[in-house]
Amino acid sequence: MAAAYLCRLNPFSLNTNSVSALAFRYGMHRKFFSSGTKALCQSSAHPQAAFFPPAEGPMLPPGSFKNKVAFITGGGTGLGKGMAATLSALGAECVIASRKLDVLKQTAEEITKQTGNKVHAVQCDVRDPVSVQAAVAELVKVAGLPDVVINNAAGNFISPSEGLSPNAWRTITDIVLNGTAYVTLELGKQLIKAEKGAAFLAITTIYAESGSGFVVPSASAKAGVETMCKSLAAEWGRYGMRFNVIQPGPIKTKGAFSRLDPAGMFEKAMLEKIPTGRLGTPGEIANLAAYLCSDYATWVTGAVIRMDGGEYVSMAGEFNDLKKVTKDQWATLEAMIRKTRGS
């Protein structure tokens, strides 16, 4: 999956040949579930989760973003909403953007009421350079050029790759890679002209690094986003800009699992792969995002930080499944190993 906010386009507009590929709409892949902010109740089958309780309140001092402007795409729901709420609580004037203006306005009003800091709603379709230009113009009008830019808007669906049409491929890459590029380049050019620095952050996914079948457009586009951020960190540091990336693991959110996994079997399989025994929360991602965009992280740029409860390394290790071996079975295996002779 991609980022916190998932653009819910009409799946039937993708012209893919596989009906089953469209059974899950955007935002339904197991790697990323993205709205809601409450800590999760974990299964008693994973008691180690008690050692790793989520802390969701802002970790930075109050006022850390006072007099700063933050622009967040996909800011109406999910991780985007969580990041906007945290930055607003820390003093930022937030501008949230997505295609659905009604959702944005509701979120903006909610966060403004919670934090006492004004949150603005700006409609933007990141796939469209003209829409991005208009949104940036509105951002500058209502709040000024941003100090923080978070590229969080994304879309995804699962599909056998042989069922992908050109339009299906283009739909995802337009949102994820091109959309991030349009926002970054439009704002970057204006910031350079104004001689103003900024912290950029992109939200990707752990499979941007490893690759993954059945989400090839998303994996490819997210990998491109990471490469773009590292490249611009090298090139635009001279203009006072930083670029970092967060790769979130699976985050359970309100509504997503009820549509994806009504029997609870998918969540169970996911938790088996996470050493900490629980899913992540939007507040945890928001705290990392706030740190990376803050003045406490001015020497952090070009970084790609994985935050997944250990899922990536758990899946990567060839012998990690040996954790399922019982003590009695280990005793048997060790006896067999001792009897081995020669090389």
Image (tube, rainbow, N blue to C red):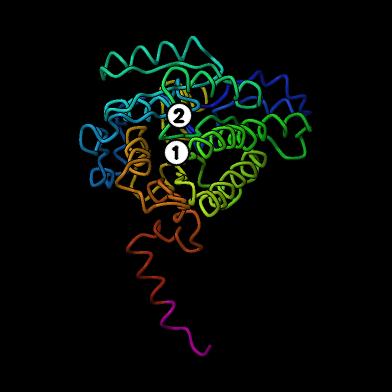
Q: Label 2's element? A: loop
Tell me if mark 1 has few (under 14), some (14-19) or many (20+) residues whose alpha carbon lies within 10 angstroms of its own. some
Highlighted magenta segment, given as a residue range: 336-343
Q: Nearer the viewer, residue 201 or 261?
A: 201
Q: Label 1's element? A: loop
Q: Nearer the viewer, residue 39 or 155?
A: 155
Q: Residue at x 38, y 28 (%)?
A: 69
The answer to whether residue 233 is above or below residue 329 is above
Residue marked by disc 1 = 196
Circle number at residue 91: none
Q: Residue at x 51, y 18 (%)?
A: 138
- Relative image position of residue 113 (x, y in whole percent): 28, 13
* Disc 1 + disc 2, Cβ < 8 Å: yes
Residue found farthest to the left: 61
- The amino acid type of the residue labelled 2 equals Leu
Q: Earlier in the sequence, mark 1 or mark 2?
A: 2
- Relative image position of residue 123 (x, y in whole percent): 54, 16
- The amino acid type of the residue labelled 1 equals Lys
Residue found farthest to the bottom: 342
Residue marked by disc 2 = 145
Residue 25: tell me if it is visible.
no
The chief SS type of the magenta part is: loop
Q: Quadrant of the N terminus?
A: top right
Whether the magenta-drawn stretch holds residue 339 is answered as yes
- Relative image position of residue 333 (x, y in whole percent): 41, 71
Whether the magenta-drawn stretch holds residue 100 is answered as no
Q: Residue at x 23, y 47 (%)?
A: 51
The answer to whether residue 225 is above or below residue 258 is below
Residue 286: tell me if it is visible.
yes
